[in-house]
Image: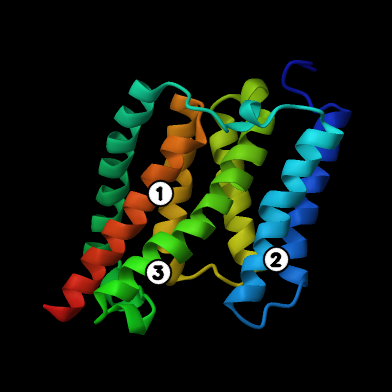
Amino acid sequence: MNTKTSLNKKDIISILMMIFCLFMVKLFPEKDYFQKLIVSLTFLLAVPALYIKITLKEDLKDFGWRAGDWKRGITWIFLSLAGAFLILTLLYQYAGLAEKYYVPQNIIQNFGLFVFYEIVIAGFFLALYEFFFRGFIMFSFLKKWKAISIILQFSAFLLFLIITKDFNWGSVNYIIASFFSGVVVYKSRSLLYSYLFSLLFIIISDAVYINSLVN
């Protein structure tokens, strides 16, 4: 067995912690957005961050909390946006995404609410997803499994959507963003650029969808 790629005790404990956090998000009751915010903040950010600092005794910089290679980061933001929108365009043309995708109705006719929703609400959850899936999960195995860690974090995000019953057409842009965010992180070694990519992709894709409804 190749010891460089095999799982050790620390890896196994980290995997168990990842699974624990994912299922705790599902198990805790969420009656409204505020409760969802608290639960997500606790198990997608606070618990993993404390685990990294206290149990692993590692620096958060080693999990993507750093500037990284800004030239590669910016380059791969634009390359990933091109790839992501190509996939989205194909889904619109050949999978009837326009009839299946949806956004909250109250942001369609109100630009102020649209900006608030995209920057504050979507932006907040995107930040949590970046830290947990691209930061905690991906960086835990990046050195050992390299590009395979992109698929690992993407698979974990799909599992998260399934167990939270959010695996649907309304989450398709988040699913696309998850994969390409992993690519951006792999190339830049920073969560900053993957977050900027995700935020830009979500805002633009929602804006394009809303524009198609009102025109």
Pointer 3: residues within 10 angstroms few (<14), some, or many (20+)? some
Q: How many labels sit on residues? A: 3
Measuring 36% from the left and 76% from the top, which residue is drawn there?
102
Q: For residue 146, which quarter of the picture? A: top right
Pointer 1: residues within 10 angstroms few (<14), some, or many (20+)? many
> Label 3 sits on what residue type?
Tyr
Is the C-beta separation of discs 2 and 1 under 8 Å?
no
Which element type, helix, strand or loop, lies under badge 2?
helix
Which element type, helix, strand or loop, lies under badge 1?
helix
Q: Is 208 on the left-hand or right-hand side of 87?
A: left
Of the image marks 2 and 3, the number of the one nearer the N terminus = 2
Measuring 46% from the left and 44% from the top, which residue is drawn there?
179
Pointer 2: residues within 10 angstroms few (<14), some, or many (20+)? many
Identify residue for label 2. Answer: 39
> Label 2 sits on what residue type?
Val
Q: Which one is in front, 182 or 151?
A: 182
Q: Is 154 on the left-hand or right-hand side of 103?
A: right
Residue placed furthest toward the left: 215
Identify residue for label 1. Answer: 198
Q: Which one is in front, 77 or 169?
A: 77
Of the image marks 1 and 3, the number of the one nearer the N terminus = 3
Q: Is 41 on the left-hand or right-hand side of 200?
A: right
Identify residue for label 3. Answer: 117
Separation (CA) of disc 2 from disc 1: 22 Å
Measuring 80% from the left and 47% from the top, which residue is drawn there?
17
Measuring 55% from the left and 70% from the top, which residue is drawn there?
166
- The quadrant the N terminus occupies is top right
Q: In this view, does 189 lie above or below 116?
A: above
Give the x, y percent position of residue 3. Answer: 79, 16
Please name which of the two marks, 1 or 3, marks the residue nearer to the observer.
3
